Amino acid sequence: MDILTHFNYWAAIALASIGLYAVVARHNLIKKLIGLSLFQTAVFLLFITIGKVTGGTAPILDSAYSLYSNPLPHVLILTAIVVSVSTLAVGLALAILIKREYGTVEEDEIQAEDSAAGPGPA
């Protein structure tokens, strides 16, 4: 088994690893959003790779072809990309509001300011 024949799988693993590391280990909210976007891209790549059938054609009923490629994963990924972009836009809008309120997007500084302010209204 040649490693280059499964390049898409290795790329998805690398992107998922980098994205997961950025979400877990970083304290900057913008970097966390970028990591989340990388992780989602890895999932998209994995689903597109799995959905492709080598030698397959579009599922149009024709007696000449017997091997078809399922278009459902590709359609689902198009929908997921739209949701991903929307989620990223909402996350960035929230990061802007957090920056205006707290003056920073660093998670540690935000938590320190919240704990110093004491409990909020009950």
Image: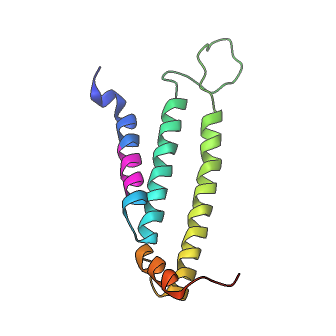
Work out whether 95 lies above or below 6: below
Please report the residue visible at 61 percent of the width from the left and 36 percent of the height from the top: 73
The stretch in magenta equals 14-21
Count of labels shown? 0
Q: Is residue 63 left or right of residue 94?
A: right
Residue 34 x %, y %:
44, 63
Work out whether 25 lies above or below 120: above
Asked whether 46 or 64 is in front, the reply is 46
Q: Is residue 18 left or right of residue 44?
A: left
* Prevalent SS, magenta region: helix
Q: Is residue 15 left or right of residue 51?
A: left
Please report the residue visible at 38 percent of the width from the left and 41 percent of the height from the top: 13
Q: Is residue 84 left or right of residue 60?
A: left
Which color scheme is applied?
Answer: rainbow
Work out whether 119 lies above or below 13: below
Please report the residue visible at 55 percent of the width from the left and 87 percent of the height from the top: 101
Quadrant occupied by the C terminus:
bottom right
Residue 6 within the magenta-colored segment of the rendering: no
Residue 84 x %, y %:
58, 56
Please report the residue visible at 59 percent of the width from the left and 52 percent of the height from the top: 81
Quadrant occupied by the N terminus:
top left
Asked whether 122 or 59 is in front, the reply is 122
Residue 67 x %, y %:
58, 16
Quarter of the image holding residue 14? top left
Work out whether 118 lies above or below 79: below
Residue 47 x %, y %:
53, 37
